[in-house]
Image (tube, coloured by chain):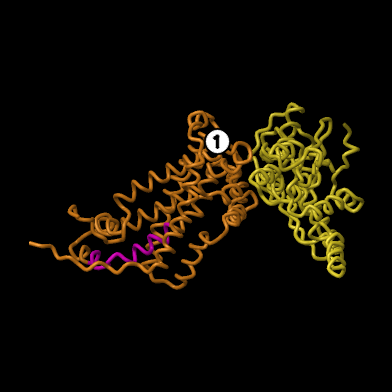
Chain colours: A orange, B yellow
Amino acid sequence: MTRATYPRAPALPALVTVLIVLAVAFLVLPTLALLVRTPWGRLGSLLAEPRLFDALRLSLVTSVAALVLSTVLGVPLAWALARARFRGRSLLRALCVLPMVLPPVVGGVGLLAAFGRRGIVGEPLATVAGVTIPFSSVAVVLAATFVAMPFLVVTVEAGFRSVDGRYEEAAATLGATRWTLLRRVTLPLLRPSLVAGMALAWARALGEFGATITFAGNLPGRTQTVPLAVYLELERDPDAALLLSAVLLAVSVVVLVLLRDRYLGVAGARRPEANP
Amino acid sequence: MRRTGALALAVLAGCAGAPAAPSGGVQGEVTVSAAASLAEVFAEVAADLERQHEGLTVRLNVAGSPTLVAQVAGGAPVDVLATAAVAPMDRAIATGRVDAGDVVSFAVNRLVIAVEVGNPRGVRDLRDLARDDLVVVVADPAVPAGALAEQVLDAAGVTLRPASLEVDVRAALGKVALGEADAALVFATDVGAGRGRVDAVPIDGVDAVTTYQIAVLTDAPNPTAAAAFVAVLLGEVGAAHLDAAGFGSVEEAGP
């Protein structure tokens, strides 16, 4: 029994191939060059330095916190933007996605204007509760969430739109409660978009610099994340800057690759068959 | 034969008469890398120079001194380098693109305590900066203002727990101007950039001065214009601008 074979797709036009190669080269070359130039031999001694280790630890902790916050707040918002019908929905979507377009430093200034000591929310908070947010680790998380959440919202909103509403209707007619509906039908169908959105948001939070340095400041151990440490280290000890960047890169790649193998994919796509 | 000889002589004379340099005057583009605190003064000097020489464009590249030196080390096509301290210029000399003999000290700057206008928190001296109820920011020690601040605090025996180590002195000033910080250690000349939202509290009893240095790079793309810029800066016009901004002269700082 022969398997049906399909005619091979025509080869890509030469121009398109060239463009693809250029695109890949442009995107990949800086990363490769960074890894080639990194003085890996000094890795051990450099990680032993508390400052650099602190930066790594802070980056990981704050980026994960920002991810959690982005997910908890972002998924309901994405649902509302995708499913709920209300006036001003387009405007709301534009406003929620705005942080993606804003220059990060401008975002930082905005965060100060809102939550700083003289901020709209920050000032009452300081006078009544004695709580100031700038220059704290919380501020780092807030800055990262501000820039990262829109990525999750946009991706998950698209995911909600692509989920076939009929599955949910069928489950509802079969007697599923809203909680069961969410847990057993909607979220599993949403999983690829959700994970993709979370990966994007986490990566963005990890790399945040402008809003962090403006809103949270820069203090080793409390607010100095890896991007900030790299910037300052470039002037002091370029080797350390390279190593720090490479370590962060390695961590990101590992997580993203792990996610990709199991979860990332087009929404609704089936798992590839075992046979070739 | 005679005509050919005369022609040859005329050509030779023409060649000898042509200027050896590509352009006789000051023109084209000149790139000046200047430390953050020099931004305004150098903009004024650049404007003066451009007025004097039509066809000249001065490009100011402003950043913290260590960043400027890193750029020079990386081969950036810069004509002039001006740093806010001696140490960064020494590092530039080490790159081989600056000759020690070309370096000129042209101004000094004094460190002061910047506070909100009216000094609402009542900061009187360096010791007050150690107060628990104050939010104090300084520039990161990697930057001249930050290094000087560290030195000065050390000499005064004050242990500061800053809320943030800003990437350059203007960022530190900005935090005070925005009301996010109560005090910052900045240069006297930076206080003017606070536009009326910042007051300066002088630092007494401790040497709190940094020396600015300038040099034309050995491989400057436009050495004529570069030399002209330096000449204006070191001349009367430049001195007037520096003085008006609050810079001190090298002589008054002492040895």
Q: The residue tagged with tag 1: helix, strand or loop?
A: loop
From the top left corner, tell me how far across and down residue B149 is, in percent: 73, 35
Q: Amino acid at mark 1?
A: Gly
Q: Residues within 10 Å of mark 1 (few under 14, many from 20)?
A: some
Would you say B219 lies left or right of A167 here? right
From the top left corner, tell me how far across and down residue A245 is, in percent: 51, 42
Do we see residue B136 in this rendering? no
* A113 or A249, nearer to the observer: A249
Would you say A124 lies left or right of B83 here? left
Q: Quadrant of residue A153?
A: bottom left
| Residue A154 among magenta residues | yes
The kind of secondary structure the magenta stretch mainly shows is helix
Quadrant showing the C terminus of chain B: top right
Looking at the image, which residue is at 63% across and 40% down? A235
In the rendered image of this protein, does residue B135 appear above or below residue A70?
A: above
Would you say B20 lies left or right of A215 here? right
Would you say A194 lies left or right of B185 here? left
Looking at the image, which residue is at 78% across and 43% down? B187
The stretch of residues the image draws in magenta is A152-169
From the top left corner, tell me how far across and down residue A172 is, in percent: 22, 64
